[in-house]
Image: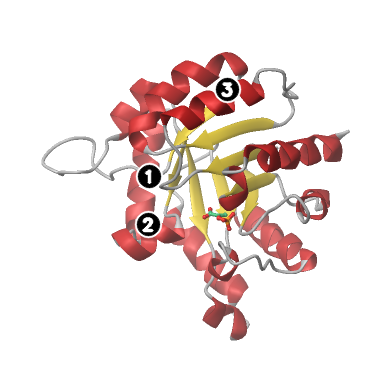
Amino acid sequence: MLIAGNWKMNLKYEDIINFKDIIFDFKLDNRVEMAIFPQFPLLYFAKKNLSDHNIKIGAQACSAHLKGAYTGDVSVEIISDIGCKYCLVGHSERREFHNETNDFVKKASTLLLTKNIVPIICVGESLEIRNKKVTNQFIKNQIRECVPDKISSNLIIAYEPLWAIGTGIIPNYEEIFNIHNVILNELSYIENLKVIYGGSVNNENCSKIFELKTVHGALIGGSSLKFKDFLAIYKSAVKQII
Ligand code: PEP
């Protein structure tokens, strides 16, 4: 399982130190990985401070180009040099505010794989798509257009319904189970594929989500900023394995 905290454009250097202090006596279980995704300038500091505690670090986005005249963008080369294990690609906020298309996601993910960084490709339907009852087809299309060709391992899909992100509302558990199942079937040729759920995961709903056999972890926004809640969610994932 993977418990991943997407800090988005929140938290600062001092919060990494606070997190390190809190994590000091916290025992991680080697069957459940913990990863955090801070803003770019914090990545190196996070890696230096947290890797001894076995916490993995990931970037929130990357360029689809390796280098060149792309002011403001960040290359996978640097993300790799820092020692990031993961990178989010095509998060809905990147799709909405930075025009990340499925084509972009595929290119960026392909580049990440060349640097041995595991892409976490975010997919998810809008409320409009859901109301039309065409979610499964929409997700299948997103997967087909976003997943790199010839990939055989090292991929995570984050299923994040757009209407569940930051709203406090989640799909019913059966829906989550079924959509994850669709994704697993669609990508059954990928070894060790993980499908994690994201969208308003919190301390109260997490245990029911982790009980679902098609869920391999969670991508957590708001609740990852409250470290006690984040650790409680992590503990709930561990309990599910035992
Ligand atoms: C996210 O943006 O990836 C996310 C899951 O946010 P939240 O947990 O706040 O809904």
Please give the residue where the numbered disc 3 appears in the rendered image.
20
Q: Residue furthest right?
A: 242
Distance, label 3 to label 2, CA atoms, is 28 Å
Q: Disc 1 marks which amino acid?
A: Ala
Nearest the viewer among 128 and 20 is: 20
Q: Residue at x 34, y 45 (%)?
A: 108
| In this view, 45 is above or below 216 | above
Q: Are marks 1 and 2 in contact (CB under 8 Å)?
A: yes
| Precedes in sequence: disc 3 or disc 2 | 3
| In this view, 189 is above or below 92 | above
| Precedes in sequence: disc 1 or disc 2 | 1
Nearest the viewer among 83 and 20 is: 20
- The label shown at residue 61 is 1
**Quadrant where the C terminus lies?**
top right
Give SS at disc 1: loop
Q: Residue at x 33, y 32 (%)?
A: 41
- The label shown at residue 225 is none
Q: Residue furthest top?
A: 52
In the rendered image, is residue 171 in sight?
yes
